[in-house]
Amino acid sequence: MDIAEKIMTIKTEIIDEVKQENNNQIEKKRKELQKKYDDFQEELDNKQKNIVNNYENMAEQKREQIISRAILEKKNLKRKKLNDLINNFIQELHEILDEFTAEKDYCLFIFNSIKAAAKELPDREFTVLLRKKDSEFKSDLEELLEKEMDDYKFDMILTEKIKSGGFIIKAKNNQQLLENTFAALIGSFREEIAIELKNNILTQK
């Protein structure tokens, strides 16, 4: 092989080696770019999934909030309706009892109630609070108690504290008292009234 052929052979080998190295570099770069693209695509997919999941979670939370709000509004509506019924019912009771206080039997009712209350308390001397409106039969009440309970002593006092009728009796020595006002009586039955109205009216379709 002459020098020209050797030179050509060496030149061809160098060119081939350069081409191979260039191809290797190109392939390496291609793989790097492909990996970057794949990583970017994966990151993009993950972001899209996260966005979708966030929207789905927000939609579910919104749906639950709407349902919860609807349930709460329904409960509040029922509670308001029940409270209105209770207040109307109690107002009617007060009106009926107010009519009763204008009757003659009311004085006898107070007299018998005071007698019963005095016997429940361990004392012989009492202060009895009556509403000011009951001043019309105060003297009659004092006379009846003096005749039938002569071993007891009652001090009758008119007060603005009692509005709807009834009385409050206090034992003078041990400070015990019984409140037998109509307002206290109705208040003690308020829960039972609420349960009765709820079971028999609100449950009806």
Image (tube, rainbow, N blue to C red):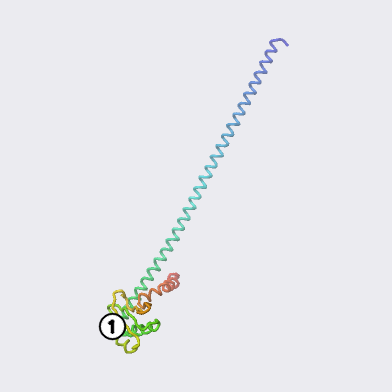
Quadrant position of residue 127? bottom left
- Apparent side of residue 195 relative to residue 103 in the rendered image (left or right): right
Q: Quadrant of the N terminus?
A: top right
What residue do we see at 29% from left, 74% from top?
Answer: 160
What residue do we see at 41% from left, 66% from top?
Answer: 79
Q: Nearer the viewer, residue 83 or 105?
A: 105
Question: Residue lying furthest front in this view?
Answer: 173
Query: In the rendered image of this protein, does residue 23 appear above or below residue 51?
Result: above
- Apparent side of residue 144 relative to residue 50 in the rendered image (left or right): left
Q: Residues within 10 Å of mark 1 (few under 14, many from 20)?
A: some
Quadrant position of residue 14? top right
Instruction: Pinpoint residue 28: horizontal percent, then vertical percent.
Output: 61, 29
Identify residue for label 1: 138
Instruction: Pinpoint residue 33: horizontal percent, then vertical percent.
Output: 57, 31
Question: Residue lying furthest bottom in this view?
Answer: 147
Q: Quadrant of the C terminus?
A: bottom left
Question: Residue lying furthest right in this view?
Answer: 1
Question: Residue lying furthest left in this view?
Answer: 136
- Apparent side of residue 11 relative to residue 180 in the rendered image (left or right): right
Q: How many marks?
A: 1
Label 1 is placed on what type of residue? Lys
Instruction: Pinpoint residue 22: horizontal percent, then vertical percent.
Output: 62, 23
Q: Nearer the viewer, residue 195 or 48?
A: 195
Q: Is residue 178 visible?
A: no
Quadrant position of residue 157? bottom left
Q: Is residue 28 visible?
A: yes
Secondary structure under the numbered disc 1 in the rendered image? helix
Query: In the rendered image of this protein, does residue 150 appear above or below residue 66?
Result: below
Instruction: Pinpoint residue 192: horizontal percent, then vertical percent.
Output: 43, 74
